[in-house]
Image (cartoon, rainbow, N blue to C red):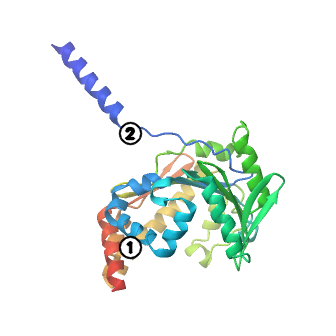
Amino acid sequence: MKSSLRFGLGLALAVVLAAAPAARAAEPDKLLPADAEFVMSVNVKQVLDSDIIKTYALEQLKQALQGNDAKKFLTDLGVDPLKDVDRLVVSGSGKDQSDTKAVIVIRGKFDPEKLYKAAEAQTKKDPDHFTLVKDGKDVMFKYQPDNGNPMYGTVVDETTVVAGTDKKMVTTALAAAAASAKPAVGKDLSALITRMDDKASLWVVAVVKDKLNNVKLPGGGGGNPNLQGQLAKLETVTAVVKVTKDVNLDITLGLKDADAADELGKSIDEGLMQIKGLIPFLAAQNPQLKPLGEAAKTLKSTVKEKSIVITAQLTGTAIGELLKQGGNNKD
């Protein structure tokens, strides 16, 4: 009898574990540049399928895409953003904003011929901003905004569109797509990526070692004279956002050593305490901010060896209240 009971419980446990959605480790995208310092991945399909979006935002998104200009443009492209886009991946590097380089990879389902014809038509309609560019055998389209740096983009195949701040970055991505080579991103960044859950709504990873040494904090670091030095010991940053019926945020800060983590952890705890004390006061002055007060209560930081983990949650109910308040303000 006991043996049968143990077998039944074991079988039930196995069924439950098999049915549970397992986390899937992310992999570096081979179209990303070798010098990338950060990567952000947005699981567009998962976000659109989440309870929060379906409840509070899906109809508004559909209505926005049904506008005359948007509908015609998307028809020309042959793309339905609510169905055809699976994932958006952004990577970048640079010393400052003027030096920033970025590559954007869009994964989904596309019609290359329609995309090409729509882009070509745009070069004739607005030649001051859109031009066709050739780099060897590669053909791409350049968008030059009135202010700022240009962007170059092209269709890789039926599942991929790529864009970059430099045409060489696009041609490198095209070459990588055609080759069987492994992803080119650096070892440290690659290691961070493989720790991410690819089923998450959004994740961000960044290698910041020795990049914050000369950053000047506004307001002197909020009255904390040690914060500048503590941030200089920061080496990695990761963030994961999971959108389901609620929104959950996890941020992990990787430090030089355990002592550095303890020191920065104390500063973060002090900052979170200030936020928790300030938001209820602001909510009392402005009732519209009351849902944020509930989110502030969930803010928590924990030091784990050389890392600091910060977590927070915004419930679907709170998001609904915020959106309702925003809608009332428009009336």
**Label 2 Cα crowd, 10 Å radius (few <14 / some 14-19 / many 20+):** few
* Image coords of residue 73 (percent x, y): 55, 69
User: From this viewpoint, is residue 146 visible?
Assistant: yes
Residue 144 versus residue 4 in the image, above or below: below
Question: At 65% across and 62% down in the image, what residue appears?
Answer: 117
Secondary structure under badge 1? helix
Of 160 and 3, which appears nearest the observer?
A: 160
* Residue 206 appears in view: no
Disc 2/disc 1 C-alpha distance (Å): 37 Å
Residue 135 horizontal side relative to residue 319, left or right: right
Residue 277's tag is 1
Q: Residue at left 43%, top 52%?
A: 46
Q: Earlier in the sequence, mark 2 or mark 1?
A: 2
Q: Quadrant of residue 51?
A: bottom left
- Of marks 2 and 1, the one in the foreground: 2
Residue most extreme to the left? 1
Percent position of residue 190, x then y: 65, 44
Return the residue nearer the eye: 6 or 27.
Answer: 27
- In the image, is 84 to the left or to the right of 185? left
Rendered image quadrant of residue 301: bottom left
Residue sitting at x 78%, y 63%: 133
Q: Position of residue 100 (x, y in %)?
A: 72, 65
In the picture shown, does residue 120 fall above or below 256? below
Question: As rendered, which of 240 and 174 lies closer to the eye?
Answer: 174
Q: What residue is rendered at 46% in x and 53% in y?
A: 45
In the rendering, at what x and y percent does residue 210 appear?
72, 57
In which quadrant will I find the C terminus?
bottom left
Q: Which amino acid type corresponds to the residue marked 1 in the rendered image?
A: Gly
Please give left or right for residue 26 compared with residue 128 in the image: left
Q: Which residue is mark 2?
A: 21
Under mark 2, the amino acid is Pro
